[in-house]
Amino acid sequence: MSTKYKFTDKAATYFTISTIIGWIDVFTRDLYRHILLDSFRYCQKNQGLQMHAWVLMTNHFHLIYSCAVNYDPAMVLKNIKSYTALKIIDAIIKNPGESRKECLPAGEAGILETFRQYGEANKSNHQYQFWQHENHPILLDNVEMLEQRITYLHENPVRAGFVELAEHWKYSSATDYYTKNKKGLLEIVSVY
């Protein structure tokens, strides 16, 4: 059995990606970003989540993290994704300003219909599917891998053309790593 993309050591540090199904740009709205960030904060406080680096893009997030003793990194990530899927879908349904919810201009299915179609195709869902099920956890067991992944993660908004410097992207830990005396939106446990 392959261990390439599995959580093999509960005490280790991992790099993961969590992607919205269909790569839909949900995190362009503050309301939805805040739900995810609040979930991270809750898990930091109550489920042993130790975030070392992170970035939130419009349709996915990367996370480098470990967990305190007696906490399971796979379960913590599962909890984040389960909770945020329910809360964000509910927020989309209830948001009168969400123009993409029903139908898109070119006659394409709106985001709720897309979530429903993916949900119906996957028997492990009740109605909708928000997140892709794979997280692709990569064990970061040496300093070189850790540094490479932190750089990759922080440079994501630069490669996407959103900012010129990684530390200018509000939704990442680049501020914590690349600036002096500035803190990002989430508490991190620096690896340096």
Image: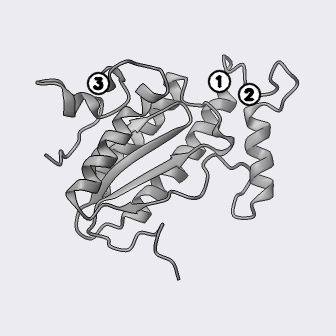
Cα gap from disc 2 to disc 1, whole angstroms? 9 Å
Cα gap from disc 3 to disc 1, whole angstroms? 31 Å
- Image quarter of residue 178: top left
Q: How many marks?
A: 3
Kind of element beneath mark 1: loop
Residue extending farthest right: 107
Decide: marks 2, 3 in contact (CB < 8 A)?
Answer: no
Q: Residues within 10 Å of mark 3 (few under 14, many from 20)?
A: many
The label shown at residue 167 is 3
Q: Amino acid at mark 1?
A: Asn
180 or 47, nearer to the observer? 180
Q: Position of residue 93 (x, y in %)?
A: 69, 31
Decide: marks 2, 1 in contact (CB < 8 A)?
Answer: yes
Picture layout, residue 1 above or below residue 108 = below
Kind of element beneath mark 3: helix
Q: Which residue is mark 2?
A: 101
Q: Position of residue 12 (x, y in %)?
A: 28, 66
Residue under the point 46% across and 20% down: 162
Q: Residues within 10 Å of mark 1 (few under 14, many from 20)?
A: few
Q: Amino acid at mark 2?
A: Lys
Q: Which residue is mark 1?
A: 95
Q: Tell me which label, 2 or 1, sits earlier in the chain.
A: 1
Picture layout, residue 82 above or below residue 36 = below
114 or 136, nearer to the observer? 136
Q: Position of residue 22 (x, y in %)?
A: 69, 42
The label shown at residue 114 is none
Q: Tell me which label, 3 or 1, sits earlier in the chain.
A: 1
Q: Is residue 49 visible?
A: no
Picture layout, residue 13 above or below residue 93 = below
Kind of element beneath mark 2: loop
Q: Amino acid at mark 3?
A: Glu
The answer to whether 171 appears left or right of 176 in the picture is right
